[in-house]
């Protein structure tokens, strides 16, 4: 196993590839996938040997490129020292109605529990978002996959989209893709790589803000979704989603996104506003566009809300220093 991994990954890293994904690695130290040949619970040998494999791969690849990224399928605390990223298949790979996989062996968690604890140590990537226009039109799944991008956005995950639908022509012929999903993917990538980078990539997840006057919309569902291949029936979901992040410099970012009709919402900051012992200045960014200085909002220590029209996504960073930073 180790020899095969190195035989494949070493030439790739040597050729300039900057990330290696080790697919198929188990999430739990004692998981045996209900194999009747293995002992119940599997003992500790599985985790111990996976640690050896991960450690050997990491040491060998880092000797070639000290910045190489090593990721795996699924994730667990046991492997934190050996991995940089892992895949989270939940949001587009599992039905919202399913709470476990492999019978009752692996619980599926539809909340950002890992993100709120370990985001600073191991970042997650989302599971595939379908972008094929023909596929999406056939099963009316556009909202399902917009949700599949919105959740990774507010959870701080690396979004993953399918850009090579088989049987529909070569990749990167943009006409064969659903345009709203492409545009949303572009905006998320822009946010993560520029103005929201200190929060969604380097930051620490905080308690989410309260969204008032939100609207529940119907997600029509989807057929044969990625990863598990199950059909998802229609379900209700909040139109607007939001999260809060603390950047390394101490500033706070509120990320808000809307996948439904344009609405006005009230974002209640709660304990986040309590951190302002005096007035703070908020810089509002809507889809990469900064508000002019005249529209910068002052968050008072006596006021704990921001009101605005929600569109695709916007970020509101602020700091008690009440100063504009060039990096935003």
Image: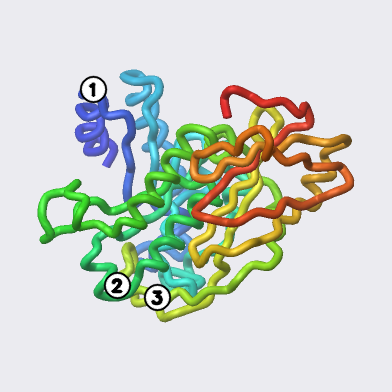
Q: CA distance from mark 3 to mark 2?
A: 10 Å
Q: Classify 10 Å Cα crowding around label 3: few (below 14), some (14-19), many (20 and above).
A: many
Q: Is residue 170 visible?
A: yes
- What residue sits right under mark 3 in the picture? 221
Q: CA distance from mark 3 to mark 1?
A: 43 Å
Cα–Cα gap, marks 1 and 2: 37 Å
Q: Local crowd at mark 1 within 10 Å, few (<14), some, or many (≥20)?
A: few
Please tell me in which quadrant of the rendered image residue 69 appears: top left
Of the 4 image quadrants, the one containing the N terminus is top left
- What secondary structure is marked by label 2? loop
Q: Position of residue 187 (x, y in %)?
A: 43, 45
State the image coordinates of residue 29 (x, y, percent, origin top left). 49, 52
Quadrant position of the C terminus in the picture: top right
Question: Is residue 128 among the parts visible in the rendering?
Answer: no
**Residue at left offset 41%, top offset 70%:** 102
Q: Which residue is mark 1?
A: 14
323 is higher (above) or lower (below) than 84:
above
Q: Which mark is residue 66?
A: none
305 left or right of 135 in image: right
Indicate the secondary structure of the residue bearing disc 3: loop
Please give left or right for residue 84 compared with residue 62 in the image. Answer: right
Q: Earlier in the sequence, mark 3 or mark 1?
A: 1
Residue linked to disc 2:
224
Q: Position of residue 268 (x, y in %)?
A: 75, 55
**Element under disc 1:** helix
């Amino acid at each position: 196993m180790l020899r095969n991994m190195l035989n494949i990954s070493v030439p790739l890293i040597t050729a300039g590839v900057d990330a290696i994904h080790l697919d198929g690695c188990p999430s739990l130290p004692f998981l045996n996938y209900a194999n009747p040949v293995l002992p119940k619970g599997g003992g500790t040998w599985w985790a111990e040997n996976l640690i050896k494999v991960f450690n050997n791969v990491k040491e060998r690849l880092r000797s070639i490129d000290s910045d190489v990224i090593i990721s795996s399928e699924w994730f667990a605390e046991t492997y934190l020292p050996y991995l940089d990223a892992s895949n989270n298949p939940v949001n587009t790979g599992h039905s919202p109605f399913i709470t476990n996989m492999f019978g009752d062996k692996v619980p599926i968690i539809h909340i950002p529990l890992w993100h709120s604890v370990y985001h600073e140590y191991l970042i997650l990537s989302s599971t595939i978002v379908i972008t094929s226009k023909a596929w999406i039109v056939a099963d009316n799944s556009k909202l399902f996959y917009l949700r599949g991008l919105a959740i990774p956005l507010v959870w701080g995950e690396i979004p993953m989209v399918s850009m090579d639908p088989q049987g529909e022509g070569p990749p990167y012929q943009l006409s064969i893709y659903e345009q709203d999903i492409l545009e949303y993917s572009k905006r998320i990538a822009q946010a993560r790589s520029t103005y929201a980078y200190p929060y969604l990539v380097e930051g620490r997840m905080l308690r989410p803000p309260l969204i008032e006057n939100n609207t529940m919309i119907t997600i029509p569902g989807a057929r044969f979704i990625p990863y598990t291949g199950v059909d998802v029936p229609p379900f209700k979901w909040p139109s607007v989603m939001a999260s809060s992040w603390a950047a390394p410099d101490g500033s706070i970012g509120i990320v808000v996104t809307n996948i439904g009709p344009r609405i006005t919402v009230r974002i209640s900051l709660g304990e986040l506003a309590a951190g302002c012992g005096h007035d703070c200045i908020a810089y509002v960014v809507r889809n990469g566009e900064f508000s002019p200085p005249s529209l910068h909002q002052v968050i008072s220590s006596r006021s704990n809300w921001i009101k605005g029209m929600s569109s695709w996504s916007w970020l509101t960073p602020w700091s008690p220093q009440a100063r504009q930073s060039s990096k935003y």
